[in-house]
Image (cartoon, rainbow, N blue to C red):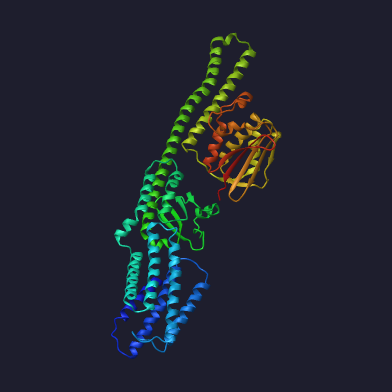
Amino acid sequence: MWAACAFGALAVLELLSLAPSRSHHLIERTLVRVELVLLVLFPYLLFRFTRAFRKVRRRAPEALAVLTGGLVAWTIVLPAVPRTGEHWGTEWLAYVIALVAHWVLLSAVAATSLWRAGVDQPSVARRRVRLMAGAAGALAIALILAAIGTGAALSLGAQSAATLSVATFLIGFAPPRVFRMLWHSAEQERVQQAITRLLTFAKSQEEIAGRVLEPAAAIVGARAIAIRNADGRIVAAHDLPGEHWDALEAGEPPPRLWPDAEVLEIEAPGGSMVVWTSPYAPFFGDEELALLHTVSGLTGLALDRVRLFQAEHDIRVALERANDVKLNFIALAAHELRTPMTTIHGFVTTLHHLGERLDEDQREQVSKALLQQSERMVRLVEQLLDLSRLDAEAIEIAPEPLALRPHLEEIVAAAAPIPEAVELDVPPEAVAIVDRHAVERIVSNLVTNAFRYGMPPVQVRATQTDRHLRLSVEDRGGGVPAEFVPDLFERFTRSDRSRQSASGTGLGLAIARSYARAHGGDLLYEDADPHGARFQLVLPVKK
């Protein structure tokens, strides 16, 4: 708007100068006053144009506005304007000096502001604002030469300076294509550099974003820049204080890092780019912004490519792990089943061939061993069937209102070898909407393990919020060795300490966690205080 007003004033001034001259005609005298007013207003309008890009103290614009208004008023009340060749009176001389001083002052301020603005700009924007700074200075020189006198040399110098100023202003505002091509070499090189880096393979989004950060910032002379992925997470940033990361990732508007910062948000498939640059960039660096949009789009595609690669890699690793688990499961299941089967087969063979030779005590020992091994085999088969149903998501979770304390008392009485050694810390009135069977399978397993691998007393606690049921089983044993915790819930895995202290299959905790997750919750482990193991079941409470 200010640029249109400034150069529109010059255009009107040029049109008025074409009006025919009529001596002492009222219209002519009015037109002369209008021309002078336009001359007074042009440098002020140019000053406002240069100041429209950045915040400044209000005193300076207000003071210059008052100065300009006073000079406009003086122009209107001038008694007479001498014609060419006429003698200059004292009042007219003083007015010309004030006009030239006003023009030089405002042009110098505008030129300095534009020149300083080009410091952090990319090549095209820097040349454009500095060309305009030079044009403002040339126009001031033209006015000075025109005011000094009417000699041929001065007139030629004023006309040359004015012509140069007009041409320079035109190139600064709308550079011809040949100028843009010459000036764009640095930006084109940065874009090619950015594209080359984007096409190079990267293992992470942080790596790919870090490669393009510097070239992208240099394209528009950005002082700060952040690159986000499709999830809104910042994967790379330059000169962005850490306290602003969370706000940006939460979708809040980007902060203004300095008073006259121009904040640009460039959205692209697969990500977005937030750029903090100078206020001149959107006006004088339009082509650079177009290049930045191109780089942002390519960056989004590269981020999405890395995301797909990571997803494919994770799936491949998961499949490989699942295959290993399947093979290990088959081998370990066969091994675990072979032990009771071999024992049972041996005892049955003994009874078949030597049964008549065994006395009553020997028969009773063989029968007891057969019962123990068959029970062990039944438990193992049941656990394997549970795992297969859980893996196939064939177990139905049916939440229902459940009085927790009575149900937990039943579980403890059935699962604990010494029920009196279990401390039950559950409010009598506690009722949760959960699956009865899932809670029973999980808690009974945890209570059994607490006695088998830990030491009494065993504490069972339950707390309920509006959204979750938290149930913990804690013992006072030695706890789980730190190096074994990552494998604690894996199938058929047992620590060396547990193998030495008690028998088992290594399936109980895997089944318990599978039940918890089938219920939409989880089973977690932590060391108890001061010692022991604490398993915490977290289940969502259905409403």
Q: Quadrant of residue 496?
A: top right
Tell me what residue is drawn at x 58 percent, y 26 percent.
504
- In the figure, is residue 45 to the left or right of 338? left
Relative to 296, residue 115 above or below: below
Q: How many marks?
A: 0
Relative to 48, residue 439 above or below: above
Tell me what residue is drawn at x 53 percent, y 43 percent.
520
Nearer-the-camera pick, 162 or 126: 162
Query: In x, y percent, where is residue 524?
Result: 59, 39
Relative to 104, residue 498 above or below: above
Q: Would you say residue 237 is visible in this rendering?
A: yes
For the N terminus, the image quarter is: bottom left
Q: Residue furthest top?
A: 357
Nearer-the-camera pick, 113 or 370: 113
Query: In x, y percent, where is residue 329?
Result: 49, 28
- In the figure, is residue 119 to the left or right of 417? left
Tell me what residue is drawn at x 39 percent, y 74 percent.
6
Tell me what residue is drawn at x 38 percent, y 71 percent.
139
Q: Would you say residue 233 is visible in this rendering?
A: no
Nearer-the-camera pick, 292 or 220: 220
Query: In x, y percent, where is residue 325?
Result: 48, 30
Query: In x, y percent, where is residue 434?
Result: 57, 44
- In the figure, is residue 15 to the left or right of 108? left
